[in-house]
Image (spheres, grey):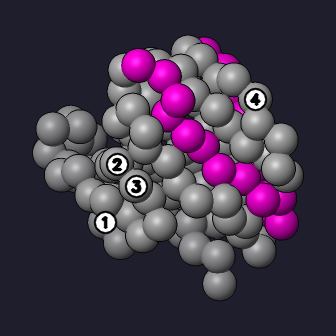
């Protein structure tokens, strides 16, 4: 890892997988967060959901989120409607919109999540 004046270069293998609350058979690597980087505006992570994995429907008060599907297939639920998602699909979730993602496919569902601001205080 290289760190200079708040800038940081790291490799994904330097970050351990974590299981977040209300996530089931789903793991994330929190790659850039205010806890370990000089950012106040972003949370950037990669997530891997095993078949049957999901995050329960939820919404955020002020956070905006972008999901970018890298591998696998699943269902993205937005305001109670489910849509198939697959590699290179991107999803924007504004504040207050209920959403969930499910791995209904046969292989791991791997995707990026960018959230701003990083906390929903």
* Numbered disc 2: secondary structure: strand
Q: CA distance from mark 4 to mark 3?
A: 20 Å
Q: Which residue is mark 1?
A: 36
Residue in front for this viewpoint, 35 or 25: 25
Q: Residue 24: which disc?
A: 3
Residue range in magenta is 88-106
Say if mark 1 contacts mark 2, CB within 8 Å.
Answer: no
Closer mark to the observer between disc 4 and disc 1: 4
Residue 18 x %, y %: 27, 58
Residue 42 x %, y %: 55, 57
Q: Is residue 121 above or below residue 63?
A: below
Q: CA distance from mark 1 to mark 2?
A: 25 Å
Say if mark 2 contacts mark 3, CB within 8 Å.
Answer: yes
Say if mark 3 contacts mark 1, CB within 8 Å.
Answer: no
Q: CA distance from mark 2 to mark 3?
A: 4 Å
Residue drawn 47% across the image and 66% down it: 22
């Amino acid at each position: 890892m290289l760190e200079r004046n708040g800038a940081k270069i790291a490799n994904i293998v330097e970050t351990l997988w974590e299981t977040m609350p209300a996530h089931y058979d789903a793991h994330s690597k929190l790659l850039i967060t205010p806890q370990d980087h000089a950012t106040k505006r972003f949370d950037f992570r990669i997530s891997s959901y095993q078949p049957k994995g999901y995050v329960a429907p939820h919404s955020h008060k002020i956070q905006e989120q972008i999901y970018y599907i890298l591998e696998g297939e699943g269902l993205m639920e937005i305001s109670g409607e489910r849509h198939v998602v697959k590699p290179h699909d991107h999803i924007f979730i504004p504040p207050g919109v209920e959403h969930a993602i499910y791995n209904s496919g046969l292989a791991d569902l791997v995707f990026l999540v960018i959230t701003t601001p990083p906390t929903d205080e």
